[in-house]
Image (cartoon, rainbow, N blue to C red):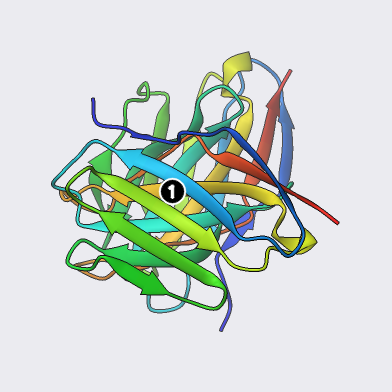
Amino acid sequence: KAGVTQTPRYLIKTRGQQVTLSCSPISGHRSVSWYQQTPGQGLQFLFEYFSETQRNKGNFPGRFSGRQFSNSRSEMNVSTLELGDSALYLCASSPGGQGYGYTFGSGTRLTVV
Amino acid sequence: GESVGLHLPTLSVQEGDNSIINCAYSNSASDYFIWYKQESGKGPQFIIDIRSNMDKRQGQRVTVLLNKTVKHLSLQIAATQPGDSAVYFCAEKDNQGGKLIFGQGTELSVKP
């Protein structure tokens, strides 16, 4: 059974640019959540999508957005990148609904220069 | 806001000893808790979970204890091995949906 796949693994972007990250959940999982991990702030929740609808949103500015497709794959977008956006972005897949179990991907390491 | 916090940022143990990692949570309505292990350059790896209607759950070499009275969670690792060296996070599931609230993490170092 394939795990959670995140692409790309590494990205280097310049301030002011935008970036799109992709996450393919475990087959059959309908919920995808995104987290930002930094040394200073730890793991922080960005948003969760379930059946193509945003179900929860964390305390991040509107530059951070996401979407989910009908096949449950999800993308997150960060516009007008800032140096502080440099982080490991993690995606977690779960069955959704009242299901439990959250499996993380290996993450995308974003560096903003 | 609600948060999950860890008591000890670092823990150093001898190979073969038992390890205990602690976690305090503040949301008494949280219904699900998970322990993750994260190695350098990797995403968090699921270790064990527990629902709020349980006090204890055991896995292979790991046990999670939940004390709802004092809102405390612990992870016990038996016969700790060098491969257990990593950062360990506790997380609670927000009862409003699929949001996980993570603790700050504890770095476990196992000395051979």
Sort mark 1 into few (<14), some (14-19) or many (20+) by Cα contacts within 10 Å: many
Residue A2 on image: x %, y %: 58, 78
> In the figure, is residue A13 to the left or right of A73?
right
Residue A16 on image: x %, y %: 60, 15
Image vertical order of residue A95 relative to residue B14, above or below = below
Between A11 and B65, the residue placed more toward the observer is B65
Between B58 and B92, the residue placed more toward the observer is B58
Please say whether residue B44 is visible from this viewpoint: no
The residue positioned 55% from the left and 78% from the top of the image is B60
The residue positioned 20% from the left and 39% from the top of the image is B27
> In the figure, is residue B23 to the left or right of A90?
left
Between B51 and A66, the residue placed more toward the observer is B51
Image quadrant containing the N terminus of chain B: top left
The residue positioned 57% from the left and 28% from the top of the image is A18
Q: Quadrant of residue A57?
A: top left
Indicate the secondary structure of the residue bearing disc 1: strand
Residue A90 on image: x %, y %: 54, 47
Please say whether residue B7 is visible from this viewpoint: yes
Identify the residue at the far bottom of this view. Answer: A1
Q: Amino acid at mark 1?
A: Cys
Image quadrant containing the C terminus of chain B: bottom right
The residue positioned 29% from the left and 57% from the top of the image is B66
Q: Which residue is mark 1?
A: B90
Residue A89 on image: x %, y %: 56, 41
> In the figure, is residue B112 to the left or right of B22?
right
Image vertical order of residue B23 relative to residue A82, above or below = below
The answer for which chain carries disc 1 is B
